[in-house]
Image (cartoon, rainbow, N blue to C red):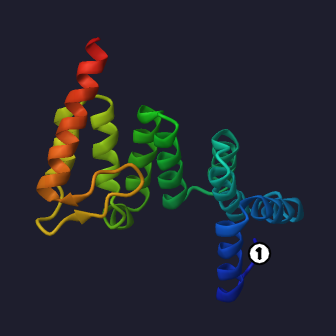
Amino acid sequence: MRHQTLEQMRAEHEILRHDPQKYVEMMTGYIQDDPNDAHAYFSRHQGWEKLGRFDDALADLDKSLNLEQHFIGYFARGELLVRMGRYQEALADFNRALELDREEWLGSWGVLHRADCYARLGNEEAALADCARFGDDFSHPGFGGLPGGNKAEVTAEIRRRARAAKQNLKS
């Protein structure tokens, strides 16, 4: 595993933001140097994802997790699986992330991600059970396809999504 300074990490992040293809090529070089570097696979998945190559991103996350089980790997794979419409698999990854690091999970809007997956699967009861775990001061800015607002607003949208999904399943 390579060790980086904060300045190197910032520079790489800028490349990811502005030239994801170059970022993928750079990470591929790191992987060629050390095929067992879980962090390089994790990093490369971000470039693939920005390029819209979700299958390649998923393959890199799978490889990263095979090399090193880590909360953030499961969380990221869950988010990617949601983007791919694979909600049941995403739930399994979000639950695995919770098992690995409960504190990080709770601090990362993990409960909202899971509630949204349950809602998209039409499981209103499970979705609302997760919403009930939100603190009274809960709020989300509404990015990443997740509902935004305070606890009541987000819960109402989760309820709406669950009912819509359930109705679509009946059709």
The percent coordinates of residue 167 (x first, y second) are 23, 20
Disc 1 residue type?
Answer: Arg
- Quarter of the figure with residue 25: bottom right
- Quarter of the figure with residue 3: bottom right
The secondary element bearing badge 1 is classed as: loop
* Above or below, comparing residue 141 to residue 130 in the picture: below
Give the residue displayed 84% in from the left and 63% down from the top. Answer: 34
The percent coordinates of residue 154 (x first, y second) are 20, 52
- Tell me the residue that label 1 is attached to: 2
Between 166 and 149, the residue placed more toward the observer is: 149
Give the residue displayed 40% in from the left and 62% down from the top. Answer: 101
Q: Residues within 10 Å of mark 1 (few under 14, many from 20)?
A: few
* Above or below, comparing residue 41 to residue 87 in the picture: below
Q: Could you tell whether 86 is left or right of 130 in the image?
A: right
Give the residue displayed 70% in from the left and 80% down from the top. Answer: 11
The percent coordinates of residue 28 (x first, y second) are 82, 59
* Above or below, comparing residue 153 to residue 141 in the picture: above
Q: Quadrant of the C terminus?
A: top left
Between 163 and 37, the residue placed more toward the observer is: 163
The percent coordinates of residue 158 (x first, y second) are 22, 43
